[in-house]
Amino acid sequence: MRIAILLYPGFTTLDATGPYEIISRLPGAETVFTAKEAGPVRNDQGNLALVADRPLTEVTDPDIVVVPGTGDWEPVLRDRETLDWLRAADATSTWTTSVCTGSLILAAAGLLRGRRATSHWLALDLLKEYGAEPTGERVVTDGKYVTAAGVSSGIDMGLSLVGRIAGDRHAQSVQLLTEYDPQPPYDAGSPDKAPAEIVAFWREEMRRTT
């Protein structure tokens, strides 16, 4: 089973590494990080790089596609080469997935039209522009498309996918071995729970910068 994790300049690190840590533990998994060119690809903060093992042209038939998100999605939404690769990979994939604003990239490629999908809460409504049906759920499965909400939810998405492919026992073992047992010091991980003034601040920042 080949798992292709897409990289592009400005990707959010945990969007890629969270699912990788979980999905790469599937039986017989072969995980490849891929980008337009092989080599290091910088994240959204510019202070960390992951290495693309192979260029997109060499990754033609993945079983699972993982698309991480980014805080600056406009460049990749206009990147015809990347969108064309996603369409081609999706044509033969068993599962096509995204984390955070990665769902905008899938949607821009025309893959989520008429489908339920989620994204980072600040970008959720933008899915409508591409014909998708936004939902605030943490992980959404619609056919073979699995989208996860903001950054950390990629781990949940990975576990959900592992359970579907390899069964509950294997997924539970992966959760145990990665000791994924979140106990955050704050209950502010969604706009429904965070203090209203913080949510309002970031909504205004979103409006100001887009």
Image (cartoon, grey):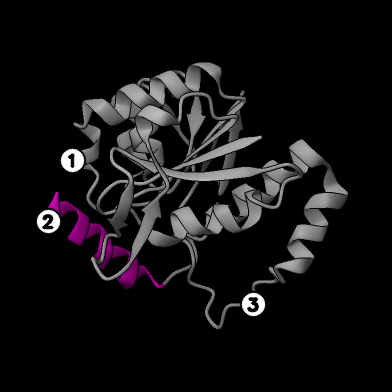
**Residue 176 image position (x, y, % from top left):** 78, 67
Tag 1: Cα neighbours inside 10 Å, few (<14), some, or many (≥20)? few
Q: Position of residue 129 (x, y in %)?
A: 28, 27
Residue at the (72%, 72%) spot, across then down: 179
Disc 2 or disc 3, which is closer to the eye? 3
Q: Residue at x 45, y 61 (%)?
A: 14
Is tag 3's residue or tag 1's residue first in the polypeptide sequence?
A: 1
Q: Nearer the viewer, mark 1 or mark 2?
A: 1
The amino acid marked with disc number 1 is Pro
Residue flagged by tag 3: what amino acid is it? Gln
Region of the chain picked out in magenta, as a range: 195-210
Q: Quadrant of the N terminus?
A: top right
Q: Estimate how packed mark 3 is, as few (under 14), some (14 to 19) or many (20 or more) residues with alpha carbons within 10 Å.
A: few
Q: Which residue is mark 2?
A: 208
**How far is disc 2 from disc 3 in space, using C-alphas?**
33 Å
89 vs 119, nearest the viewer: 89
Q: Quadrant of residue 199?
A: bottom left
Q: Which tag, 1 or 2, sits closer to the chain's start?
A: 1
Q: Which residue is mark 1?
A: 75
Kindly identify which residue carries mark 3.
183
Amino acid at circle 2: Arg
Residue 100 in the image, given as x and y percentages of width and height:
42, 49
Judged from the image, the secondary structure of the residue bearing numbered disc 1 is: helix
Q: Secondary structure at mark 2?
A: helix
Which residue is painted at 64% across and 77% down in the image? 183
- Marks 1 and 2 sit apart, C-alpha to C-alpha, by 18 Å
